[in-house]
Amino acid sequence: MSYERKGRFQYASKADIAKYVSDALDDIIFTMGMSKDIRLHAEIGFRDVRPDIWLINYNGSPVGFIEIKKPSRKIMNDPVVAGQVFDYLKLLESFYGIEFQFGIVSTYVHWRFFWLSGTDAEAQQNIITSKLPSADQSPLLKELPGIPCYDDNVKNLLCIKVIQSSDALQTVEKREVHASRIFTLADKNIILAIVSILYKMVSSPRYKVNVADLSRSYIQLDEKSWHWEGLPKNLSNIKFNKIPRADAKNYICLAYLGSGAEGLVWLATTTGGVGCVVKLAKAIKPISAWKDDQNTESQTRDKMEEEEFNKTLSHLKTEAKHWMSLWGFKAQAKIIGGQPALVMPYIKMCTDDELDNNNEIKAAVNSTIKQMARKGFRHNDLFRRHVGIYWKEGILHALFVDLSDIKEDKEEDAIAYMVKKLKI
């Protein structure tokens, strides 16, 4: 950890600091022989609840985070930073089942470690074990919905029953975090402190998360904002047989499903129990050359963010049109949580094994390829992870998601292209 020149830390932007912190952590992880146990990642997040760096184990599950800040006299005690940290820790707890949640805030010259109140005992431990536990290879969720049926008069609705836990959540706890003392680069214990927190992150037990559970905290969104909240107490099940009404304004994120070309994808429900999938636009990242204290640059950033906002909403509206023209589903591009979003039907995504060995699914996928090609289009960014299935009128149908990159093409060329991409 030696990115100092003549006793002064040199940086031009927050991006520079992030690079220094990442390099320092990579060095520590490598030196301690932890490269197979933990690594840095920067994708998963929710709107502005997106730490600069996630720490994940080798099977891709988040175990902790690092938030980067520019050095200042008060930054490590800033209530706004504490609020950000609380949200990151809640994501680890509620969506990823991390029992003991830890996070790091760093300016590179100063480091501080944070946790939720239930992790106090573990935070005080200074023992570093010589052998880390094997990462749990099982899914994060106990249950995802099966294959939905989108018939008007379907008898056997696909639904998830809300677990009525004996320890049902009554209110979301106070927005409070606990923290270590502030470490500096000159502190002789800084390396050991970082190593200790990394070991605690990787070693924390992880439990599988129920999709719908009254004892969990969830991200609830309206048109302009979001907050942590429990499920409505009168909600008994979540149904997956139709798309929410166009005038629905409140959504609850149930599970993180992954990222698409233009956003982060969540299994969600309305407060009335209509299940769906919501794609939230990715947070707008600051340009590294901007400086927070320059008014003109701040105004330029606001203008660029507005332009990017409108551009993203326009793209999502186009994607919604593709959902209707290709698959007959009324997806909705709208503002949710203060950002562009796309509301889509829930579709059961296929596994590689199903695409290789299930003849009924393979036939449905081939039919979908031909259907799309007949309409003069191809999915220009098609991978197996984009293939989903659903029932309608007793027939198994397939469709492709992530429709942000659709190209016109001749029918024969489109078929050949998509068959090759899916290897079927």
Image (cartoon, rainbow, N blue to C red):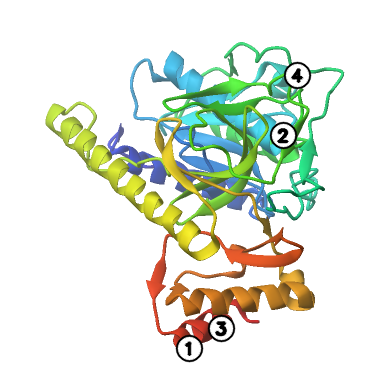
**Neighbours of disc 3 within 10 Å: few (<14), some (14-19), many (20+):** few
Q: Is residue 36 above or below residue 332?
A: below
**Does any portion of residue 297 appear in the rendered image?**
yes
Q: Position of residue 179 (x, y in %)?
A: 58, 18
Indicate left or right for 97 with 284 as reference: right
Q: Position of residue 265 (x, y in %)?
A: 55, 47
Amino acid of disc 4:
Ala
Q: Earlier in the sequence, mark 1 or mark 2?
A: 2
List the residue tagged with mark 2: 98
* Residue at x 22% of width, y 43% of height: 289
List the residue tagged with mark 4: 121
Q: Is residue 390 above or below residue 280?
A: below
* Residue at x 68% of width, y 30% of height: 93
List the residue tagged with mark 3: 420
Q: Position of residue 296 (x, y in %)?
A: 12, 31
> How much space separates mark 3 and mark 2, taking CA atoms?
40 Å
Which dot marks residue 332? none
> How much space separates mark 4 and mark 3, taking CA atoms?
54 Å
Indicate left or right for 405 with 87 as reference: left
List the residue tagged with mark 1: 412
> How much space separates mark 4 and mark 1, taking CA atoms?
64 Å
* Residue at x 74% of width, y 66% of height: 395
Q: Earlier in the sequence, mark 4 or mark 3?
A: 4
Q: Are marks 4 and 1 in contact (CB under 8 Å)?
A: no
Amino acid of disc 1:
Glu
Q: Is residue 222 above or below residue 204?
A: above
Secondary structure under the numbered disc 3 in the rendered image: helix
Q: Are marks 3 and 2 in contact (CB under 8 Å)?
A: no
> How much space separates mark 1 and mark 2, taking CA atoms?
49 Å
Along the line of sight, the residue nearer the viewer: 118 or 50: 50
